[in-house]
Amino acid sequence: NKVLSSLLSLLALSNSFMTHMDRCKNQMLFQKIDESLIETDEHALRFDGIARLYGEENFKKLKGSHVAVVGLGGVGSWSAESIARSGVGAITLIDLDTVCVSNTNRQMVALGSTVGQMKAEVMRSRILDISPKCNVSAILDFVTGENCLEILKGKANENNSTFDCVIDAIDNIEDK
């Protein structure tokens, strides 16, 4: 029964993948017909699954949202990537720390090639690889009691805008 169940799951996954591949091929054929649609449709192509899952109206809300992630360690780095993969249109990353080799077991940003680099800058580059049209700001600072209001009210981010959501992934309990 376990083998049969595993085979059925694999078959379902394979069928789902093939359906996705067929949809991509059709989109590519459509794009060849009208090259002007390639650039304007890129975001929709990248996040088609999100739009289908949550609906077009909610997808547009995600695309128009601005999320701040405070702290890019074991919780914040994974959160930032998940947000980017959800099609959020603007993300502000806040952290002053650098990637350390001991972060490898738990942090998205920690790779051999990123050791010593600023976590916010590494995460910014990664997000732009995932979602090139995302407006990503990196604030190289730690959020503390002294600067919290300035940063979270949007005065310190490049867009001078407020945030729709703030993820507190700070690992310093005094600053929470």
Image (cartoon, grey):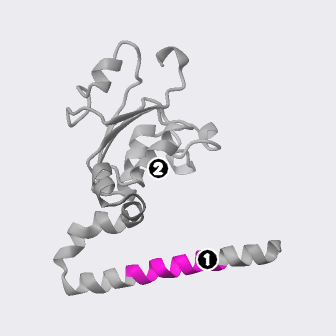
Residue 42 place in picture, x, y as percent = 28, 67
**Dot in front, 1 or 2:** 1
Q: Residues within 10 Å of mark 1 (few under 14, many from 20)?
A: few
Q: Residues within 10 Å of mark 2 (few under 14, many from 20)?
A: few
Of all residues, the one furthest to the left in this rendering is: 36
Residue linked to disc 2: 82
Along the viewing direction, whichever of 9 and 132 lies nearer the viewer:
9
Residue 10 place in picture, x, y as percent = 66, 76
Please provide the residue range marked out in magenta.
Answer: 11-24
Along the viewing direction, whichever of 82 and 55 lies nearer the viewer:
55
> What is the CA distance from the residue labelled 1 to the residue labelled 2?
25 Å
> Which image quadrant for residue 147?
top left
- The amino acid beneath tag 2 is Ser
Residue linked to disc 1: 12
- Mark 1 or mark 2: which comes first in sequence? 1
Give the residue displayed 27% in from the left and 56% down from the top: 133
Along the viewing direction, whichever of 103 and 70 lies nearer the viewer:
70
- The amino acid beneath tag 1 is Ala
Residue 111 place in picture, x, y as percent = 56, 49
